[in-house]
Image: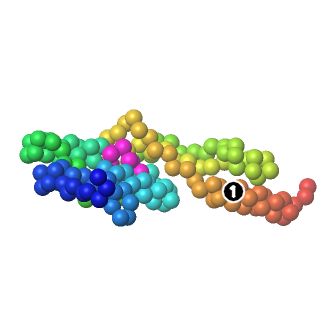
Amino acid sequence: MAGIQRYPTVEELRDFIPISQPGGKVKNAEQKFNDQIAIEVEKAMKNGLPFCDKAARDEWKDYFDRITKDHMRKYGYVRIDEVKMPEVDWKKYSDLNNFELIEEGTTLDANLTKRHHDISIEIRFKKYKYKGYDKDTYVVMEDPNQAVQRVYDEIERKRIEGIRAPKK
């Protein structure tokens, strides 16, 4: 049996989905979408913006359902390799015009407070709601390094003012 190779027929190749390619695993459109959404969420968070991934995923699901119905009608089954990644306007999911500010405030960060010798470090936050999605809220937190710097600057300012304050 060694050395015998059977090549697939044209009929067998029609439904063939490659498991891997020279660069690694082949990704379908949904996996590519999930990878891209993770990148976009990270970009938005770095810029201090909320990102409504729920709306993006809902639009993807609508697109996928539409393509699935079309394939079922044409072929009788879904050809996953032919489902392509749609063009997505990622900016609309992090545009502040599409969000409503619900709450703004500060919260004590116990971990930072503990690491900085029991100086109370509070992190600013903003809680948003995406218009049209009442259940989901998105919280954007201040960068921890900025919060620590802000607290130390405040301590320094108070120390300098204490030196300049006239004694009574």
Q: Residue furthest top?
A: 135
Q: Position of residue 86 (x, y in %)?
A: 24, 56
Q: Residue furthest left?
A: 74
Tell me the quarter of the picture where residue 88 sits.
bottom left
Q: What residue range appears in magenta?
A: 51-57
Residue in the image at 86% along x and 63% along y? 163
According to the picture, the residue beneath numbered tag 1 turns out to be 148
135 and 60: which is toward the camera:
60
Residue in the image at 76% along x and 61% along y? 157
Q: Position of residue 87 (x, y in %)?
A: 25, 59
Tell me the element at label 1.
Answer: helix
Quarter of the C terminus within the rendering: bottom right
Mostly what secondary structure, the magenta segment? helix
The answer to whether one can see residue 89 in this image is no
Above or below residue 164? Residue 127 is above
Which amino acid, mark 1? Val
Q: Position of residue 51 (x, y in %)?
A: 41, 51
Q: Position of residue 39 (x, y in %)?
A: 42, 58
Residue in the image at 23% along x and 46% along y? 64
Above or below residue 71? Residue 13 is below
Horizontal arrangement in the rendering, residue 149 relative to residue 46 (left or right): right
